[in-house]
Image (spheres, grey):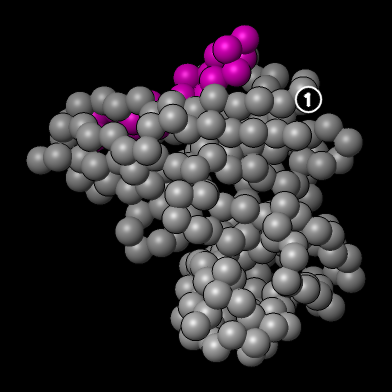
């Protein structure tokens, strides 16, 4: 069974500063994928970034980067130069690529990020 | 492209009533999913489908049924609603790929069961 743990229920950051949102995962599979989604107060789920377990480079998408430490089973999201519009709930999720089950996502409980002006 | 749409956006039911939530996607995706989101719980998978005519149970399937008669539609049914089913329901879809499998989400349906 897979498990995602997000230990920070809430985080605060000053505008223009960087922030790291923590995510640890547990799986016995060798092939898996890690995702981060953003959920603003309007409620929609917005895909941010993906990291495959065999990807050698950390994933980056604009101001988002994923600090992937496979041995520690962590996949932290780093947001650089925070903006007020980054205030939202952030979810870490994973799926396994083993046995053809790569379509089921397991989500963490989320971290509520507040960006202060 | 509309992406993933959900109908209705809001609904209030009384205990014991039934209803169907409709999810539609226009991206020709093979996989479709229903999740529920409760405060402090993240998203949990209710049921999913890997293709037209197929469905399977997820993490929290009790009290729900699903059908996928057409590739573009995935219906979630509540036969006898209970207050514990008060939640926000999200539908998602994804293409068939061997590894990277981003799920595209609908806007959600907020359901209240009194």
Q: Which residues are magenta?
A: A63-83
Q: Compared with residue A47, is residue B66 higher up or lower down, i.e. above or below?
A: below
In percent of width and height, residue B45 lies at 67, 55
In the picture of the structure, the residue carrying the numbered disc 1 is A29
Which of the chains bears the disc numbered 1? A
A59 with respect to A104 (left or right): left
Residue placed furthest toward the top: A71
Q: Residue at x 88, y 65 (%)?
A: B54
Residue situated in front as seen by the camera: B114 or B30 = B114
Q: Residue at x 66, y 63 (%)?
A: B34
Q: Compared with residue A14, is residue B15 higher up or lower down, i.e. above or below?
A: below
Say few, some or many: other residues with alpha carbon within 10 Å of mark 1 (under 14 / 14 to 19 / 20 or more): some
A29 with respect to B53 (left or right): left
- Is residue A50 visible in the rendered image? The answer is no
Q: Name the quarter where the N terminus of chain A is drawn.
A: top right
Q: Residue at x 70, y 34 (%)?
A: A2
Label 1 sits on a secondary structure element that is loop
- Is residue B35 visible in the rendered image? The answer is yes
In percent of width and height, residue B76 lies at 70, 75
In percent of width and height, residue A87 lies at 27, 46
Residue situated in front as seen by the camera: B112 or A35 = B112
A4 with respect to B39 (left or right): right
Q: Examine the structure image and report whether residue A76 is included in the region drawn in magenta.
A: yes
In percent of width and height, residue A42 lies at 35, 63
Label total for image: 1
Query: Which quadrant would residue B13 be assigned to in this image?
Result: bottom right
């Amino acid at each position: 069974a897979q498990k995602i743990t997000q230990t920070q229920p809430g985080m605060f950051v000053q505008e223009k500063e960087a922030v790291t949102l923590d995510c640890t995962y547990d799986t016995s599979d060798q092939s898996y994928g890690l995702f981060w989604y953003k959920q603003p107060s309007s409620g929609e789920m917005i895909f941010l970034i993906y990291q495959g377990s065999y990807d050698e480079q950390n994933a980056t998408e604009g101001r988002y980067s994923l600090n992937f430490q496979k041995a520690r089973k962590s996949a932290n999201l780093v947001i650089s130069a925070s903006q007020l519009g980054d205030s939202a709930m952030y979810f870490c999720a994973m799926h396994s690529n083993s046995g053809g089950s790569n379509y089921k996502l397991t989500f963490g409980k989320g971290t509520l990020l507040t960006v202060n002006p | 492209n509309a992406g993933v749409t959900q109908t209705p956006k809001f609904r209030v039911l009384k205990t014991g009533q039934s209803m169907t939530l409709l999810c539609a996607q226009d991206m020709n995706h093979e996989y479709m999913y229903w999740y529920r989101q409760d405060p402090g719980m993240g998203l949990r998978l209710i049921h999913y489908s890997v293709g037209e005519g197929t469905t399977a149970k997820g993490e929290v399937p009790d009290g729900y049924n699903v059908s996928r008669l057409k590739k573009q539609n995935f219906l979630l049914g509540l036969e006898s609603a209970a207050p514990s089913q008060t939640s926000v329901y999200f539908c998602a879809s994804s293409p068939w790929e061997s590894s990277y499998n981003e799920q595209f989400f609908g806007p959600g349906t907020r359901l209240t069961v009194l």
